[in-house]
Amino acid sequence: MKSSSLILFISSILFFSCSSEDTQPYIEQEAIYFPPLTSETWDTKSMSEIGWNVTELQPLLDYLEIKNTKGFIMLHNGKIVVESYMNGHAESSSWYWASAGKTLTTTVTGIAQDEGILDINDKVSDYIGTGWTSIPLEKENLITNKHLLSMTSGLDDTSDDISVENLQYIADAGDRWAYHGVFLKLQDVISSASNQTWNTYFNTKLKDRIGMSGAWIPFESTNVYWSTTRSMARFGLLTFANGSWEDTQIVSQNFLNQATNTSQSINQAYGYLWWLNGKSSYHLPQSQFEFDGELISNAPSDMYCALGKNDQKIYIVPSKKLVVIRMGEAADGSNFALSNFDNELWEKINLLIN
């Protein structure tokens, strides 16, 4: 009898437990939205829909305009929530990415590795031959593609001129972090590995597959990408979506995970040409000093970003489903990557989204 009662009691508990679970409302996760490849159509989402503070939008836009912004976009799970153009700029206007465009080279390097035409752990000289620097051959052969991605080539960073005579020895590859234009040699590596021009490989493997506009324009010793603000947002969305565009994996999630995590032991806040928030210390361009604290203290700790000269910005925040784009002139003084503007801007963004 006791046994029967116990079985009945347990059955009742299981019944009511299951019934309780069955009555819980099912909340379907919103899929990431991707705009069409060959159309200007881009779905939008209202701020009230996601609980943002509508009254904080105009103060943010006023601040952006005062700070010389030209184009500004905020995506939530792929849809446009905020899009604004100012200071003579328009949706169809192009602007330069500066060093924010380094991350385009990162992504295309990952695509090339996914295709098996290169390995980031190989020597750079395996692809473009020896003598691409002015350092002894045994030192040059220490430099891998990964060292270029992580800014640890050990080459002199005094000048961004990457002609042979300017690529001089400072330290063994991997022993020193320094922000330097030598990463551009990766474009030569990819061209050699693919037997195509850099522009052709870039266009067919990345640009055209996510509907970007724009072009690479050589400037002095650099190669600078120019595009609309929306094209920068398309690239940010691809990265937020772990390298996929709708049902197509453009670059592997595994590679992007490596690219957006600490890539070496010197600068915790640097991946493969991506800047990382939420670390305990960071280094800045043209300095060997280690700064304590997070890169952008007002930004979410899981945020990672592409930062370009004069405040070109791509901020990606997985926890908030956010991609934020800023193009324009320098907010204050000229700068190479990080500036006080980053923290000030995130103070304003937080008032809007929290």
Image (cartoon, rainbow, N blue to C red):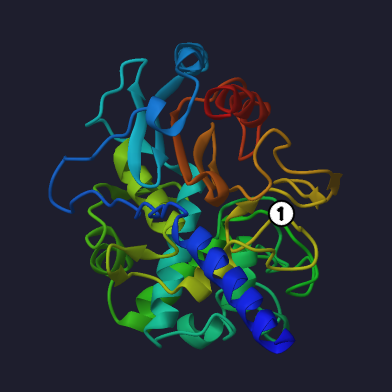
| Residue 110 point in image, percent of width and height | 45, 73
Q: Is residue 103 above or below residue 306?
A: below
| Residue 241 point in image, percent of width and height | 41, 59
Q: Is residue 154 above or below residue 122?
A: above
Q: Can you name the residue that lies furthest to the front here? A: 1
231 relative to 75 in the view: left or right: left
Q: Can residue 164 be seen in this snapshot?
A: no
Neighbour tally class for label 1: few under 14, some 14-19, many 20 plus, Cα within 10 Å? many
Residue at the spot x=54%, y=83% of the render? Answer: 125
| Residue 225 point in image, percent of width and height | 37, 48
Which residue was labeled with disc 1? 269
Amino acid type at image mark 1: Ala
Quadrant in which the C terminus appears: top right
Residue at the spot x=36%, y=44% of the render? Answer: 233
Label 1: element kind? loop
| Residue 287 point in image, percent of width and height | 78, 46
Residue at the spot x=25%, y=29% of the render? Answer: 91
159 or 37, nearer to the observer: 37
Residue at the spot x=33%, y=49% of the render? Answer: 234
Q: Is residue 338 above or below residue 177?
A: above
